[in-house]
Amino acid sequence: MCGISGVISSSNLSAIQMSNELHQMNELIKHRGPDNEGITVFSEVGNPIPNDSDQNAAFGFGHRRLSIIDLTPEANQPMFDSKEDFCISYNGEIFNYIEIRNELISKGHSFQTQSDTEVLVKGYAEWGSDLYAKLEGMWAFALFSKKEQKIILSRDRTGVKPLFYTSKKNEIRFASEIKALLPFTDNSINTDSYSKFIIENKFDFGSNTFFNSINEIESGTELIIDLVTLKSEQNRYFDPITTFLSQKVSTTKNADQLSEELYAILSHAIKIHSRSDVAVGSCLSGGLDSSTIVSFLRKLNPKISIPVFSAIFPGEIMDESSLISDSVSKHNLEWESIYPNGKELTQTLEDISFTQEFPLISTSTFAQYEVMKTAKKKGIKVLVNGQGADELLGGYYKHGQFQQLKALQTLNLKNAINGPSNAKQLLKELGKNVLTGAPNLKKSLLFNLKNDVKFLSPNILSQFDFSSKTTPKTLNEFLIRDYYQGFLTGLLRAEDRNSMRFSIETRVPFASSHALATWAFSLPSNLKYNDSTNKPLLRNLLTKHDLIPKSVLDKQVKLGFSTPMNSWISRI
């Protein structure tokens, strides 16, 4: 939706100087919101003051707007409540804002706009942090409370929307992207994060980033800043491990009943995720998840045009154009094909790196970049995509493999052989599990066998943590950690940066619907990956309701979003 920025300072910056610095920060994230810029600076007591004033400014909010809901100027930000007790600069969408708005109206609130931003600021005024439990959405916001003289930096439960900050003795700055903070802080590299990325392929460093002086607000967390002392405290308003692992996981319902429940929850989630005052499209591959999204979009909107965008690789093993064509025909979609290639990769590599603010995981990031570029050219501002379904419902081979290993450990040989992995693969994974509990052996083997280590300095290697890691006890726990703390965080980051680079908001119902996640994680593990069948409940509902082509449903090999990376790189 947008990009946000902010400065909190006790260094006697004038209003005009603070405004200029906020504008400088905004310019570096202008791609996130090209439709409007807003800057509001405040006095020490929290009153807004003119941006061109010589008066001292204590803090200020910046905003770059991508107009999607309520396109009028009245919905621009930063936005105050009617009493000017609260002010917000916000990036994201609250998808159930209409329902929350109606609840607030019943409590006596009135509204001047049709925006979800006004719902968010008045919702916090009404309920405080209890508002979080009501929200279905993705967000990163800065909220000023005049009465309490504090600023709250908040991020959604799965970290769909980014928020970074840097803190010095007399100053705190925050922004939607790291690049907006770099001109104002030390740029030295965080070698601990770097070592975790290189050695263990980690993508989530908690609150750390690749820069020593820049931190990230973690998902499900708010940072509360006292404007008098500039001290801050972190509050985790949502902890998935505590929330879901402490609940009883069971059901008396059969697969058909649960599939119908999933149908109802998913249908509602996609319905509210497609609320928009501009055209909505989707990214479509030959896989189950994106095909599911477009099938529901068509079912919910039988008469409107639905543009879809696909990366195509003619002649390559990962080309899914025939499967995509089947979905396009079944749902009468407007299909735009994109043909990424190695030459374009070399031409755009610098911009992709600047966009991502993170080392490229694979050339799939480039292919997604090209898809977003084309969607921008076609005038699309909103895409509803399928990211998160694998982590939520059990879609990866590793999830089936986990079930096999658990069966093997209990000598249940029948279940151990029924799964995606053969005996050789299982033994390999079993060996990895042994290494997890034997850190010294792991260190020895890593230093002797992993070629990447040869390129790391002794300083980086000395900081690496070889201590034992937590091993999930059940597939459900594996999925919960995967969903909130694992590889999905990297996928969401890449999608946010690629889409916002071209001023497009991507929405991910599987990754941002709390109602869907709550339902899914209340179910036993055997309903997530059954023998060799991934996502059995999703497959069941898709079959019963004839939602996607049989060719897509019956596809045997899970490709993910793959590209011909080796052939591209060999030609560079």
Image (cartoon, rainbow, N blue to C red):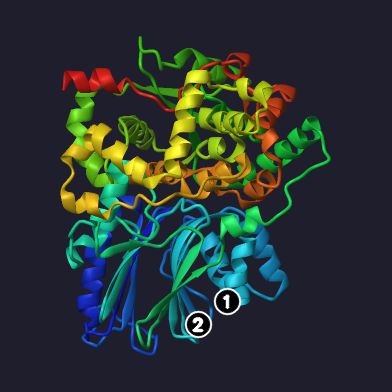
> Which residue, given by chain and number where applicable, does mark 2 sit on?
85
Q: Is residue 239 visible?
A: yes
- At x 72%, y 47%, the residue is 249
Q: Is residue 303 visible?
A: no
Q: Residue furthest top?
A: 315
Q: Amino acid at mark 1?
A: Ala
Q: Position of residue 483 (x, y in %)?
A: 53, 45
Choose between 71 and 51: the one closer to the eye.
51
Is the C terminus in the top left, top right, bottom left or bottom right quadrant? top left
Between the residue at mark 2 and the residue at mark 1, the CA separation in whole angstroms equals 8 Å
> Which residue, given by chain and number where applicable, does mark 1 sit on?
125
- At x 54%, y 20%, the residue is 328
Marks 2 & 1, CB-CB < 8 Å contact: yes
Choose between 509 and 556: the one closer to the eye.
556
Position of residue 292 in the picture relative to residue 9 (left or right):
right
Q: Position of residue 387 (x, y in %)?
A: 50, 38
Q: Count the numbered circles shown.
A: 2
Q: Amino acid at mark 2?
A: Asp
**Under tag 1, what secondary structure?**
helix
Choose between 237 and 497: the one closer to the eye.
237
Q: Position of residue 417 (x, y in %)?
A: 61, 20
- At x 49%, y 25%, the residue is 427
**Under tag 2, what secondary structure?**
loop
Specify the quadrant of the image occupied by residue 205: bottom left
